[in-house]
Amino acid sequence: MTTSRKGRIGLSGNATTVLQGFGEPMAQVRLQPATLFSATMPEGEPTCAFRRFMCKAELSTCPPPPNVDGQTCIKPVLFTGTEGSGTHFVAKYLSFITSHNLTVRHEDSSNVDILVSWAARCPRAIQMRPDIDLPAYGFDERRAVLSSWARRQVSNKCLYEKIIHIVRHPLKVVSSILAFSYCDSCWTVIEQYSVPQIAHLTAVALQEVKRIRDETGAKKAVRVFSKQVEEEFLRANMIYYVTWNRMIERVADRRYRLEDMDLNQICIELKLGTLKECSRKPKTIQHVSHGGDELQLTWESIWPIAPRVAHSLLQLAEHYGYPSNFTVPPWP
């Protein structure tokens, strides 16, 4: 037990280590590139601790304990996915069509009814300190990018009755989020709150993030990389996509592909407004781009970067209903 910066008491460290103490099977797994898809496959029921950590309120089987601050609230729904999965668009659309009695927020968990956030985690609910540990991953707290944003993502005081899993084509995602590869706080959230751990698979990418932060100074965005660095980030993004989505799979009530999800129908089914409210059609919703879409990745282009990891990504793409005509080359 340690005391956090604000005096709260909670378990420190990464989520995998903490969940090992609760007997969570996935926390015992050590991932390898060749088995990334199969090793992260949801098998059996997750522990109550894992559900709570993922912000899932399963009141019939897992009464929520008091969190580090001695309080827990229950809210209707969390929409979540990976970075670059379209959460900006989903939040804006839902804020237009849902009941005026329900609050909708994007990546802001301050007592909201409908949270839309790829990074949402609930460490408080498993007595874990709600913080990010930048120095543990080699980053300088003083130079960190988006550290306040990152801490908000893991400071949830609420669990959610429903969790809606948003997926987007993996080639679009790993390309899109390349633009944020310099973000040390983003990577700290991913590394610290991934279960199983991925740090041993992404160590080189994190070294590149640290190098970029050290060379460019505080707060400066870097979105153009050498070919070698770009490939290392793409490999890390693939590992993240598989692991993060698989975590959500274990607790999600429903899964939708961004490309064909009907938010009006979802609003009706989840009773997030009246039929009239849920049937409204926004005239315009501004799409937010991270700036990486121009890469136009293909399976042929990413395969040489990391064949074993790319194979797991391809398997998960097909699992989510994204067909491919790509023929897997013979293994050496």
Image (spheres, rainbow, N blue to C red):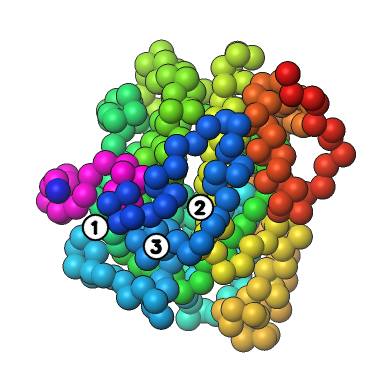
At mark 1, the secondary structure is loop
Which quadrant of the view contains residue 90? bottom right
Q: Which residue is mark 3?
A: 47
> What amino acid type is highlighted by mark number 2?
Met
- The mark found on residue 38 in the picture is none
Q: Which residues are magenta?
A: 2-19
Q: Residue at point 44% right, 42% down?
A: 29
> What amino acid type is highlighted by mark number 3?
Thr
Q: Which residue is mark 2?
A: 247
Q: Which residue is mark 1?
A: 127
Q: Residues within 10 Å of mark 2 (few under 14, many from 20)?
A: many
Q: Nearer the viewer, mark 3 or mark 1?
A: 3
Mark before the other along the chain sequence, 3 or 1: 3
Percent position (x, y) of residue 17?
31, 44
* Extreme-right residue of the structure: 325
Q: Residues within 10 Å of mark 3 (few under 14, many from 20)?
A: some
Q: Is residue 151 visible?
A: no
Percent position (x, y) of residue 168?
68, 49
Q: Are marks 2 and 3 in contact (CB under 8 Å)?
A: no
> In screen coordinates, is 61 left or right of 89?
left
At mark 3, the secondary structure is loop
Mark 2–mark 3 Cα distance, whole angstroms, equals: 12 Å
Which quadrant of the view contains residue 264? bottom right
Percent position (x, y) of residue 126?
29, 59
Q: Compared with residue 327, is residue 82 higher up or lower down, i.e. above or below?
A: below
